[in-house]
Amino acid sequence: MAIQLGIIGGGFVAAFHVRASEAVRGLEIAALTSRTPPLGIAEEVTSKRLGDGVVYDSIEEMVENVDVVALFSPNFARIPAMEAIARAVEGGASLKALVCEKPLGRNMAEARRILQLAEQIGVPTSYFENQIHLPSLIAARTQLGAVADAMGPLGLARAAEEHAGPHNAWFWDPTQQGGGVLSDMGCHSIAVGWYMLTPVGKPADYLVPEKVTAQVGLLKWGQPKWRQELKDNFGVDYTKTPAEDFATGTVTFRDPETQKVSLAQFTVSWMYDKQGLRLLIDGLGPGYAMEVNSLRSPLELFIGDAAAAGVADAEVALEKATASQGLLTVQPDEPALYGYVDEQRDLVEAIEDGRPPLLDWSYGLEIVRLTMAAYMSAEQGRTVDLTDPSTLEELETYVPLIQQGRGGEVLDLVD
């Protein structure tokens, strides 16, 4: 019998996961709930025969009718959602697993609370970080496994994610989302770099993070024209609560067995005004290299000026696409390309086989720690030493100024 999945959330991420589920056997979208009833997503579920897609008024009611609950709700709504799940389980509901879309929390205190509630519920957890499941990345690691054994592992990994900006107002609001592009997408690139450097066959958290150095900037959306566009389109005022639209940095890792040091570089931005979302990942080892570029596609389209009026939605071609004419990059199957399909398969296989998923919520907690360390580094202008007990203690209660709504103290605004 197929696993019955219940989804909390009705936005972009939930819709993308529903698309991905079309390619996953053994999983059905049984139920959905959200602050605003997700009727459109439910209609897609039923029309494509992906499950019953029943819309429930409350989380507690939904939990009683599913096997697995997926937290795809906005970052600021995660803890109330988890508390509702815990109440339902305490009241007699039975679950097989819990899923949380990145990030686990907006800061360490929130992430620990969410993990504590999961431990109280007492079922396996799966942390959904789709980019670690990119088929191209997995293929590269598989292909280079023997090479790394002979020549030595990768010494440098670089991961970048860039597009022109989020869809929804809460993503732009640092007090709701947890920051800017570093919180939104830096967690992806940090996780990918860590995973690329990890030897094949070792757990995802095998390498020990030792240092984090980062820099953030407000390079586009702090300018008057673009601030006004944000205010007009989303009601978010970056003159009052700005967030970073660019972040870059490095994480230093050490192999606990060989003591070898490796570096993961990350770069993320909301100012990539080209075809659309781009994932650029590469790795350098002794005598070998690998590279992934999501904008390389076997399909290209050209739409001239005369035909452009017939294109209603640029995102049909590519997530976060900003143009509907000219030479367009088209990805026929984005959910598979970005790893959404394979992370769902990992969830199903883990439940069926009784094994842990590739990533759990303890791993998600470590990604939050590294993201907070990056904010601390940028805010304080120093390298953050993760081997220092006092620094680790400080990170437990640290809330970045940008997340507090005080980004004007650390970001430059153009008058």
Image: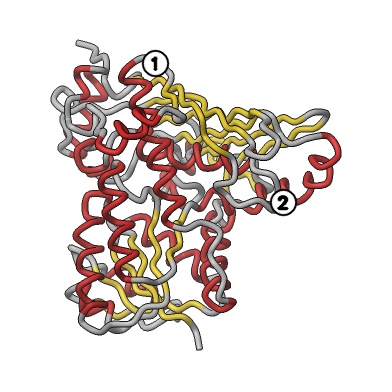
Q: Is residue 401 above or below residue 89?
A: above
Q: Is residue 395 above or below residue 62?
A: above
Q: Nearer the viewer's eye, disc 2 or disc 1?
A: 1
Q: Is residue 144 above or below residue 267?
A: below
Amino acid beneath label 1: Arg
Q: Nearer the viewer, residue 366 or 257?
A: 257
| Residue 218, image x, y percentages | 32, 21
Amino acid beneath label 2: Ala
Report crowding for label 2: few under 14, some 14 to 19, many 20 or more residues within 10 A (C-alpha).
few
Side of 5 where 357 appears, left or right:
right
The quarter in which the C terminus is drawn is top left
| Residue 223, image x, y percentages | 26, 18
Q: Give the residue furthest to the top.
A: 415
**In the rendered image, which residue does mark 2 sit on?**
139
Side of 333 where 222 appears, left or right:
left
Side of 313 where 292 appears, left or right:
right
**Looking at the rendered structure, which numbered label has been put on residue 152?**
none
On the image, which quarter does residue 378 sit in?
A: top left
Q: Nearer the viewer, residue 111 or 408?
A: 111
State the residue at coordinates (32%, 26%).
244
State the residue at coordinates (69%, 36%).
291
**In the rendered image, which residue does mark 1 sit on?**
382
Report crowding for label 1: few under 14, some 14 to 19, many 20 or more residues within 10 A (C-alpha).
some
Numbered marks: total:
2
Q: Nearer the viewer, residue 264 or 345?
A: 264
| Residue 405, image x, y percentages | 17, 30
